[in-house]
Image (cartoon, coloured by chain):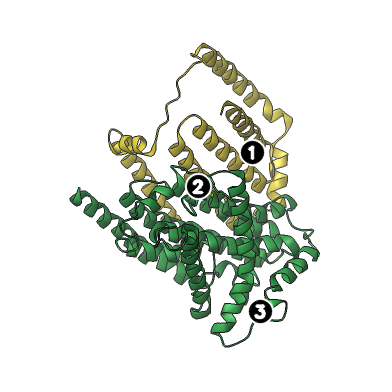
Amino acid sequence: MAFEIGSGITIAAILGVVIVVAAMLIWVERRLLSLWQERLGPNRVGWFGLLQVVADMIKIFTKEDWIPPFADRFTFVLAPAIIMTVILLSFGVIPFAPNIGVIDSNLGVLFVLAMASLGAYSVMLAGLASDNKYALLGALRAAAQMISYEVFMGISLLGVVALAGSFNLREIVLSQAEGWYVIPQFIGFIIFLIAGIAESHRLPFDIPEAEQEICAGYHTEYSGMKFGMFFVGEYLGLVLISSLITVLFFGGWMGAAFLPPIVWFSIKAGGFIAFFILLRAAIPRPRYDQLMTYGWLFLLPVSLLNLLITGAIILSVQ
Amino acid sequence: MIILFYIAAAIAVISTVCVILQSNIVHALIYLITSLLSVAVIFYVLGAPFAAMLEAIVYAGAIMVLFLFVIMMLNLGQHTRDQEKSWLTSKVWIAPSIMSGILLVQLVNVLSELDHDVELTRVGVLEVSALLFGPYVLAVELASILLLAGLVSAYHLAKK
């Protein structure tokens, strides 16, 4: 089967693999968490509990999909669709291998940032449409968190963009042939990692949906497949952030020749996914104001300094 | 490409009209976001991909999020919806309709005199940035000072 950029087969394969991987991550996460917490986790259904995902999917599809009578129907239905759409669209510019990708855009980085900023609407509209105080609180937190961390995410990327001299993700990968950007841009990498967790609101930064404080946050009123879309959307976001880190800082598909490029990409991205899951098991959730103070008083100046120093070094080398 | 332009233009016009006609403020905002995104598509088709992305990131992605944020804080409910409905009577529409009608006639007049075979030039990131940091650097700085003034006044109001 020959893949080439933008062909129908490639697009279908990417879409299928990404969604299946995101769904499988539900099981992977539960198993890995229980491994680290000395439990067994779901191991009953199928081989090593692999069919647990299928069971979960059957449950989610057949559950009653209830829209509260006090909710704003139009916005309530629209919100979960937005998160799935923007994250799946972001995968369009990710270069998975030299011959696998949807489009080869000169504005790849900007496109991902634009989609990330549109993703904030999903959470905000969900909370607003639910007409529930916990949902509204969750949405308020999500809005502040996502628009703040989007800023640091964008600035931390600029160092890589300046080094590569392009917004094209494919060219960024190719320009890392001599060395991965994680070494010259280590600070940028750390900031991007932190901002990435905050953007996909995963633990430890799952403040918008903190169960112990505000029920389930913005998706308190959601049930059935609409909740499922938020749920899978979160895992899709996890896959997206891991892919982006791989592409921007770890040379994308580049690796020793004994493995095909797509395998190298999967190994690197898979490593980051496992790391994000480990973070969830290792670090407790900060308080909401701690998160905001940390972002604006620490991450912002550090990311600006990083950009300034990177620019100065590039100029002095030229 | 030209079909894409007409589709995006139609969506932009229709959604902008919906922004005005909607009495539900959240729905109006969603229409406004749709309108801004379709304007981004128009920019892209006209050969300004960087402007298109900025439109999506800055207007649709940042400014409108802040609008929504404020609406959430104010928690406007049925009361404002009724108020909006009582304001939007048919009498109110007369004067704005006449004025926008005159503007439309002027616009069509100007457009019909334009040369139809305009060469499309694609303006990349580099060209836009060179202009922003070159001849227009003063305007960029002035705009940022304006934003700073807004920030200071917001801080002052919040402290009260």
Residue farthest toward the left in the current orientation of the protein = A316
Query: What residue type is disc 2 on?
Result: Ile
Residue B72: which numbered mark, if any? Answer: none
Marks 2 and 1 on same chain: yes
Q: Residue at x 68, y 48 (%)?
A: B80
Q: Secondary structure at mark 2?
A: helix
| Chain B palette colour | yellow
Q: Position of residue B114 (x, y in %)?
A: 49, 14
Q: Are the residues flagged by discs 2 and 1 in contact, CB closer than 8 Å?
A: no
User: Viewer-proximal residue, B109 or A152?
Assistant: A152
Q: Is residue A262 left or right of residue A305?
A: right
| Quarter of the image where the C terminus of chain B is located | bottom left
Q: Is residue B146 left or right of residue B79?
A: left
**Chain of residue at mark 2:** B
Residue A48: which numbered mark, if any? Answer: 3
User: Viewer-proximal residue, B81 or B38?
Assistant: B38
Whichever of callouts 2 and 1 sits on the residue coming sooner in the sequence is 1
Residue B19: which numbered mark, if any? Answer: 1
**Chain of residue at mark 3:** A
Q: Is residue B107 left or right of residue A135?
A: left
Q: Nearer the viewer, mark 3 or mark 1?
A: 3
Q: Residues within 10 Å of mark 2 (few under 14, many from 20)?
A: few
Q: Is residue A267 left or right of residue A256?
A: right
Query: What residue type is disc 1 on?
Result: Val
Q: Secondary structure at mark 1?
A: helix
